[in-house]
Image (cartoon, helix red, strand yellow):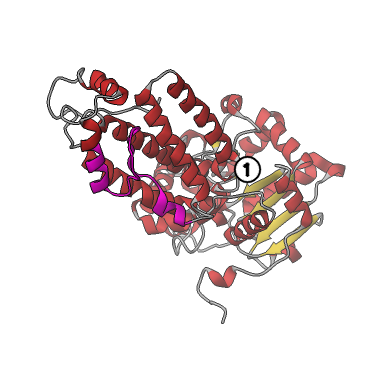
Amino acid sequence: MNCECAICKEHKPFVMPKEILDAAENGELVLFCGAGISTENKRVLPFSFYKEIQEELEIADNTLSFSKLMQMYCDLPNGRRKLLKKIKNRFEYIHSFPELERAATRFHRELAELYFIKTIITTNWDAYFEECCAATPITTPEDYIFWDENERCVLKIHGSINNLGSIVATDDDYTKCAERLEKGIIGATLKTILARRTVVFIGFSFGDEDFSQIMAYLQTELKEIMPHIYIVTIDEQLNSKLCYKNSTYILTDGTYFLHQLKLEMLEKKLIENCNTLPIIEVVNSAINDLHNKISHIDIHIYPSVIYCLAYQDGVIHAFERFIQLYNTGNYNIPGIMSSSARAYHDIKQKCTDSKNYWDEAYYEGYLNGLILIDSCEKDRDIIKEFPYTYLPNAKCVLDSYDTFFKELERVTKKDDKYHKYAKVIVDKFKEPGMVVHHPPY
């Protein structure tokens, strides 16, 4: 039985075009995103920003364009300042309710894992591509110095909420924006992208002023080399009403489109670790709790405990970095974790060779953290076997806190090289109750 909830009923089945799959595989796929994938989606708020301004102005005419209505508002005393304040308040209201923000960022969170999509173009003002996908915003010509096709960037042709002066909303703004696109470096970049890359438009609908202007821009600027574009939309009118014929329509929800693209890439083994984040978040919480417990062991009585603390610091840092940078998509690149693990194995070996046992413990932890990240999605049993504690001279498997502590007591009585090395470090900390911590370097 098919689900008919507000979300699932828009998950209409479709066949993914081969050109889109090929472009994704080659890193040539570009997304051009409109308001429908963000705050103006009716699943976020039941009233649009257009409707909010329309009601305040007591205007019943629904045929006014967005920019014309905003112009009328700005023509009032202090209108521009009030409009920008309203825009800011709308985003802040959505942010204040996590449920609303989750709804507004469904698309962006789905996109985050798709590392092969580096270039995004948007008419939206929100900062969700920056926050959820780690995209570098290119809003003004001065920002262009940060444009890098090898990193994820978002070309914000209508400005950003993080730069209120850049927002394009009124008739006057649209005119100035068109002039900048015609003559400026951002416009030149936009033309190059549209002419040479495979572009998918998502989040636009019939009557959308932004979309109409973009189509007019394409036809004016690219003329005889007008590219074939793909349009993902739930608006069934768009296909019949749009004059731009060099296009393929995909009638489905934008987030669902990205999810299906991800499934295609998973099938080709071109993306991985898509279910790893929640696993690592749980394991990270568990090892932090254990780390806190072990940190209360007196280092002056049990000097070798510093090896376990350093080891756990390494594990935690590996996990935290993975969690912190997951939205870049870089951890979803096949083979990336194995490559990192090899590099950290070499670092650990140098510590072993130089008899730097404290750093060796840290990098042992970091390395094990990377191995778990790389393996836990494929083999859940590895979580049960994961070494949460560490002693370099342990004679048994440290499979519990009690086992660890008994082994710690045993090695404390041995005056071997590890004990001596630990004591040299511990003797630098004269005050009781101090904890030895290994920073992430």
Which residue is identified by label 1?
121
Q: Nearer the viewer, residue 326 or 110?
A: 326
Magenta segment boundaries in residue numbering: 380-408
Q: Is residue 46 above or below residue 176?
A: below
Question: Looking at the picture, how far across and down is residue 130, in whole percent?
Answer: 50, 40
Q: In the rendered view, does 31 fall on the left or right side of 163?
A: right
Q: Nearer the viewer, residue 208 or 95?
A: 95
Q: Quadrant of the C terminus?
A: top left
Question: Looking at the picture, how far across and down is residue 4, in whole percent?
Answer: 53, 77
Q: Is residue 98 visible?
A: yes
Q: In the rendered view, does 274 fall on the left or right side of 433?
A: right
Residue 260 colored magenta?
Answer: no
Q: Is residue 170 above or below residue 426?
A: below
Mark 1, secondary structure of its residue:
strand
Q: Residue at x 34, y 27 (%)?
A: 439
Q: Nearer the viewer, residue 379 or 215?
A: 379
- Crowding around mark 1 (Cα neighbors within 10 Å: few <14, some 14 to 19, many 20+) is many
Question: Looking at the picture, how far across and down is residue 227, in whole percent?
Answer: 80, 47
Residue that extends furthest to the bottom in the rendered view of this protein: 1
Q: Quadrant of the N terminus?
A: bottom right
Residue 393 colored magenta?
Answer: yes
Q: Quadrant of residue 434?
A: top left
Q: Residue at x 19, y 20 (%)?
A: 429
Residue that extends furthest to the right in the rendered view of this protein: 224
Q: Residue at x 63, y 52 (%)?
A: 209
Q: Is residue 78 visible?
A: no
Amino acid at circle 1:
Ile
Q: In the rendered view, does 366 fall on the left or right side of 415?
A: right
Q: Residue at x 58, y 27 (%)?
A: 146
Question: Looking at the picture, how far across and down is residue 391, in whole percent?
Answer: 32, 35
